[in-house]
Amino acid sequence: MDRFLFPVVWFLSSITLALSLVLHNGYSLGILLLFLLSLVFYFPLKKRAPPFEFIKLDTALFVVLLIYGLAMMFFVYLDGWHTRELDRPSRFVFALPVLALLMRCRPNNLSWLFYGVVSGAIGAFCLGLYERLILGYGRAHGAEHPIMFGDTSMMLGLMSCAAAFYFYSRKSYIWLAVSVIGVLCGVGGSILSGSRGGWVALPLIGLFLLWQSRDLLGKKNVTAVALISFVVVTSAVAVPQTGIQGRVMQAVDDVARYIEGDFKASSLGLRFEMWKGALYMFESSPVFGVGEYGAKEFKQRLANEGIISEQAVVFDHAHNEYLNALSLTGIIGFLALMAVYLVPLRLFLRKMREYKNNWNVKAYAMAGALVPMSYMDFALSQSMFSHNIGVMMYVFPIVFFWAAVRWAEKEYTEGLATESLKANKSD
């Protein structure tokens, strides 16, 4: 059974990443099958000797995902127990048996996760290009909102950098080239969507990636990559056909008009109105927030009093994850949000430091760290967890890559033990 089950589990993880934007609900198919497999096979696998001991770091990830999911369910209860709102927070709980299953299924080839990431980025770009050039859409979006499509594409592109470092370290130059294409395609998919919020992540995370890879690439290669990246980004901004220049200038104009008070119906103007309303809601109920359903009445009252624009009332969230958490769930929900960002990030960064020169482990830790890093940037201009894809493409990639880190770590320690045994025998 194991010879069949183990490869299938990791293949489904890869497929989840590869199809995330290409198909409608493409991220759901693999995850659903993984969840069902975890219910059927986890306990039979548990009866056998565990592949490795669970450590405190595993427990920390389990606990933070569980607490966040249960906390958000509690806020659904406080908000009137609209059961349809349990769907998104339940995903944080459902990810736990999937994580447990992955940590008991020895992978034949962990590289499948990187194949999925790179394929997902390339697929997103191809779909976006088809929508823009053939269908004539103003913004690429696939089956999602353009912002969700663009931000997810950007994240896959950034994760493709980790894949590129991994294949470079293994001298797998064909997949290195494919991964570089994945980087460009992931960023390109974001550009085609016109989602400006994701572009903020590029310089900051780009510097992080270059710094972390400086020993692997060497000073000359790092300098070359930095210069090439600068030229590519500058050219993309300078060429009007990419749409970047227009979107940036539109943002500047929106801010100027909002400050002058003569134009509040723009994209950024409406965001400022939503953020203002969120701050009023937080001030009204700072501990537990006003709730998602309570917010509708509250915003309408603010609009009636002329505090915010009437056009800002129709939006379900504040287009800022931090302010959205503060307004709807108060400081308690905000702290839970920061925990579900920072705990996984800290765990992955710890593994990156621990295996700083071992890219067979570090690359998976880097890819995992890029998920919360990307989301913390996207959260400045979008409430990612208010969308199903936003929840699914956060919690499950974290689960996939944490399990991958632990297996890669085990393979490394087993290799050291084998070498030590051989050395002792030769003595």
Image: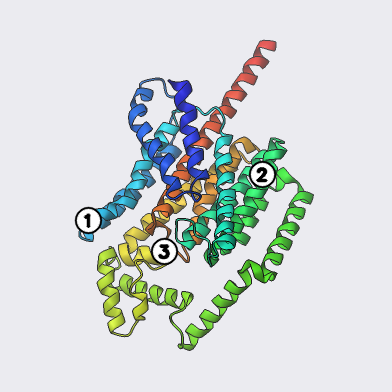
Would you say the residues marked 1 and 3 are in contact, meaning their CB atoms lie under 8 Å apart? no
Picture residue at 72% right of the left edge, 39% below the top: 173
Q: Amino acid at mark 2?
A: Val
Q: Amino acid at mark 3?
A: Tyr
Picture residue at 36% right of the left edge, 55% below the top: 336
Quadrant of image for the C terminus: top right
- Crowding around mark 1 (Cα neighbors within 10 Å: few <14, some 14 to 19, many 20+) is some
Which one is in front, 230 or 356? 230
Measure how far apart labels 2 and 3 are at the Cα level. Answer: 36 Å
First in sequence: mark 2 vs mark 3: 2
First in sequence: mark 1 vs mark 2: 1
- Crowding around mark 2 (Cα neighbors within 10 Å: few <14, some 14 to 19, many 20+) is some
Picture residue at 48% right of the left edge, 83% below the top: 258
Which one is in front, 267 or 171? 267
Color theme of the render? rainbow
Measure how far apart labels 1 and 3 are at the Cα level. Answer: 21 Å
Occupied quadrant, residue 422: top right
Left or right, 345 with respect to 311, comes to right
Per the rendering, the mark at residue 178 is: 2
Tell me if residue 188 comes above or below residue 366 in the rendering.
below
